[in-house]
Image (cartoon, rainbow, N blue to C red):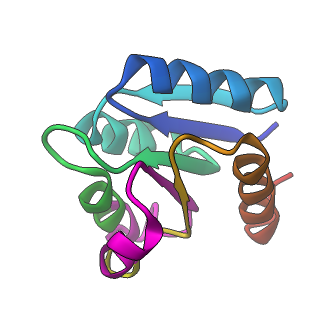
Amino acid sequence: MARILCVDDNDTNLYMISAIISRAGFEVSTAKDGESGIAAIKAERPDLILMDVQMPGIDGFEATRQIKADPATRDIPVITLSAHEREDKEQEIRDSGCDAYLTKPIDVQALLIETHRLLEAVGVS
């Protein structure tokens, strides 16, 4: 069973995304900000990360940059989630190294499609 870490500072979003992912058959863990997300990634080595963009402290783009800069975690796929349209964040998306970008409110089907696609790309089912 694939392990997915959800990082979001909003309790409602964290609950909703975790419920969607767990109902789809994945093991889910959570973190409430960028700093604790990075610590959880290093400790747990999830198979995929769902990363909110706007969080206090280290935002999702900076957390993703740190994850992708670390040889031990750079191959973990990151789906970045934001209320901002992709076009508004195109440069930050590229600079951070995120593997996919989805807008909120979350399209459940798109989230599951991207999750499966990225897990298959790294050989996790």
Left or right of 6, for residue 47: right
Question: Is 25 situated above or below 98?
Answer: above
Residue shown at 82%/36% (left/top)? 1
The quarter of the picture where residue 93 lies is: bottom left
Left or right of 28, for residue 53: left
Left or right of 67, for residue 17: right
Q: Position of residue 115 (x, y in %)?
A: 72, 53
Within the magenta stretch, is there residue 81? yes
Q: Position of residue 52 (x, y in %)?
A: 40, 45
Direction left: furthest residue:
57
Residue shown at 48%/26% (left/top)? 13
Residue shown at 51%/36% (left/top)? 6
Left or right of 35, for residue 52: right
Residue shown at 55%/70% (left/top)? 99
Q: Position of residue 40 (x, y in %)?
A: 40, 36
Within the magenta stretch, is there residue 53? no
Q: Position of residue 70 (x, y in %)?
A: 35, 67
Question: Is 25 situated above or below 58?
Answer: above
Task: Give the tally of numbered discs.
Answer: 0
Residue numbers of the magenta segment: 67-93
